Amino acid sequence: MGELPLVVGQIFNGFSVASLFVLAALGLALSFGLMRVINMAHGEMLMLGGYLAYLTFLVVPGPLAIFVAMVAAFIGAALVGAVLEMTVIRRLAARPLDTLLATWGVSLIMQQAARDIFGAIGVGVTAPSWLNHTVAITGGPLAGLSFPATRIFIMAVALVVLAGLGALLNKTRIGLLVRAVNQDRQMAAATGIDVRRIDLIVFSLGTGIAGLAGVVLALLGPVTPNVGQSYIVPAFLVVILGGLGSLAGTTVAAVLTGLVSALSQIFVDVSLSQVLVLLFVIVFLQFRPQGVIAVRSRALD
């Protein structure tokens, strides 16, 4: 393979990795942007989505099982997130350090529960046959390049989620209420907005999106009790780089980190590329500490 197909292939991989990062990071950006809560159990919502996908494929085999799994994972993770918000987050919201420690404890409990139920080795989800192929280029300067259909599907899912979330936040009444609470929580409460309910809805939506991310992750590798931990650190980096609480910034940051990771792997191995991504984030924040897109709100001010 020549240099051009190699570079184009890595750019494709960069956007594919960015799709995973943005799905993993959107929930964190939502919960921190609105509630200033760092949910250390967010990675376990990805894990939960993966296991729900595995169970769904056992019950509903067939080419459309992936879509049933996505609905089941979104609803299941959102329900678990709602319980977590009502029982833990809401009671500790005024104490960020306690919230961080409590959600970390929840993540350990969920990992151990998954280990007891499904085992430590992990379970596999077989992608439907219509995703088990590649789109190959046989002629021209990009001859020899191929794009896995699974990766294309993941990018499509990320685009649909971003479009749906953007429409929800900008075109609906609930989105208007979310933006009002995000700008000024006290003023929003004074005008009669039930900020507790908005917190619950947004937190559940974020965990539901994490559940969706777990489903598409299950198409790429086995689901293990620690699978969420592999993506939680990059997700945090993406949220910080994007500008705390900014969904547009989170998306741009995911693309930047994905491209840096993929293109650096042309020259170095995967481990060193992760170090380079971390260095990229650190250097970027030295010149722009507020992140890609700065969010102005009274809570962050």
Image (cartoon, rainbow, N blue to C red):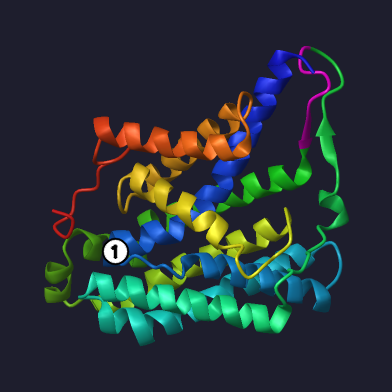
74 in the magenta segment = no
User: How many numbered markers are drawn?
Assistant: 1
Please state the horizontal and vertical placement of residue 140, each as a whole percent of the image. Answer: 81, 13
Left or right, 184 with reference to 6: left
**What is the span of residues highlighted in magenta in the rendered image?**
141-147
Left or right, 219 with reference to 19: right
143 in the magenta segment = yes
Name the residue located 72 percent from the left edge and 53 percent from the top edge: 220
Left or right, 94 with reference to 233: left
| Camera-side residue of 273 and 75 | 273
| Mark 1 residue type | Leu
Label 1 SS: helix
Q: Is residue 59 in view from this perspective?
A: yes
Please state the horizontal and vertical placement of residue 31, each as a whole percent of the image. Answer: 36, 64
Residue 15 vs 234, above or below: the answer is above
Q: Is residue 176 in view from this perspective?
A: no
Residue 49 vs 112, above or below: the answer is above
Left or right, 149 with reference to 178: right
Residue 73 vs 1, above or below: the answer is below
Task: Name the residue beneath numbered marker 1.
Answer: 34
Label 1 Cα crowd, 10 Å radius (few <14 / some 14-19 / many 20+): many
Please state the horizontal and vertical placement of residue 125, each as a whole percent of the image. Answer: 78, 64
Name the residue located 77 percent from the left edge and 43 percent from the top edge: 149
| Camera-side residue of 49 and 273 | 273
Name the residue located 57 percent from the left edge and 75 percent from the top edge: 111
Q: Quadrant of the N terminus?
A: top right
Q: Quadrant of residue 32?
A: bottom left
Please state the horizontal and vertical placement of residue 200, each as a whole percent of the image. Answer: 36, 77
Instruction: Name the main secondary structure of what is drawn in magenta.
Output: loop
Q: Quadrant of residue 8?
A: top right
Q: Looking at this rendering, what residue extends furthest in the bottom direction?
A: 87
| Camera-side residue of 63 and 33 | 33
